[in-house]
Image (spheres, rainbow, N blue to C red):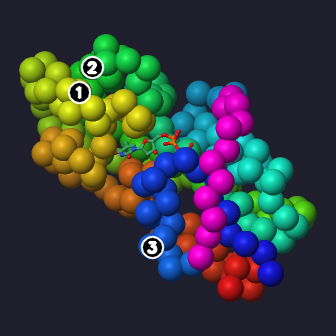
Amino acid sequence: MGKLILASASPRRRELLALTGLPFEVRPGNGEEIIHTDDPAEAVKELSFQKASAACGLASDGDLVIGADTVVALDGTIMGKPKDEEEAFSMLERLQGREHGVYTGVTVIKKGTEECVTFSERTAVHVLPMTSEEIWDYIKTGEPMDKAGAYGIQGRFAVYVERIEGDYQNVVGLPVARLYGVLKKFREEIV
Ligand SMILES: Cc1cn([C@H]2C[C@H](O)[C@@H](COP(=O)(O)OP(=O)(O)OP(=O)(O)O)O2)c(=O)[nH]c1=O
């Protein structure tokens, strides 16, 4: 009977996967992440596949390994995590007052077989106008630095989110309803 393995260091992804009620282990990967495309939907699929593949090395045959990756996309630019506060400021300055897309890619690989499912999910996020002072105050909370697009919808940034279209959990890092549907298809391997 194979195990379910989450190839992620993100505590948020761990909490979201726990919502399925399925038992799983966490194995953060340390593989290199390389993107070969400008298309955010393809990029997150590729990155999630790299994370899942890297963690497969230590898995046993029959295990299901899950990798995920989240980016923010605006006007053809892909935003990952900011490297410093200045970059966080320039990302938030571009995001404020308009709509952007948050893409999470997920890959599930069944180790030792050809079975592999990869998908990406998009959620539209409408951000209210922010002054430069508000952006700097938000950066000082420390929330932006480990998050794609330099914000966390689940944290203090919530007051600037006018509305979203799509799956909220997808913005936080894991489209858990869609993933659960995929895992159900592998059911006999994980229960
Ligand atoms: C837009 C947004 C992103 N994020 C997070 C989700 C992801 O954890 C992070 C994007 O970084 P990722 O590279 O997708 O993931 P990670 O490095 O945190 O974890 P791992 O690779 O080990 O799985 O941004 C939020 O928590 N809230 C948000 O509103």
Kind of residue sitting beneath label 3? Leu
Query: Which residue is tagged 1?
Result: 139
Q: Is residue 73 magenta?
A: no
Query: Which residue is tagged 3?
Result: 19
Kind of residue sitting beneath label 1? Ile
| On screen, residue 36 above or below 159 | above
Q: Is mark 2 within 8 Å of ligand 1?
A: no
Residue 94 percent location from the top left of the image:
28, 23
Mark 3: few/some/many CA within 10 Å (<14, 14-19, 20+): few
Answer whether labels 1 and 2 touch (C-beta < 8 Å). Answer: yes
Answer whether labels 3 and 2 touch (C-beta < 8 Å). Answer: no
Quarter occupied by the C terminus: bottom right
Kind of residue sitting beneath label 2? Phe
**Which of the marked residues, 3 or 1, is nearer the chain's N terminus?**
3
Residue 117 percent location from the top left of the image:
71, 61
Left or right: residue 59 versus residue 16 is right
Q: Nearer the viewer, mark 1 or mark 2?
A: 1
Q: Nearer the viewer, mark 3 or mark 2?
A: 3
Mark 2: few/some/many CA within 10 Å (<14, 14-19, 20+): many
Left or right: residue 7 versus residue 162 is right
The secondary structure that dominates the magenta segment is loop
| Quadrant of residue 46 within the rendered picture | top right
**Gap in angstroms between the C-alphas marked 1 and 2:** 7 Å
**Which of the marked residues, 3 or 2, is nearer the chain's N terminus?**
3
Residue 76 percent location from the top left of the image:
47, 26
| On screen, residue 90 above or below 175 | above
Query: Which residue is tagged 2?
Result: 89
Name the secondary structure under disc 1. helix
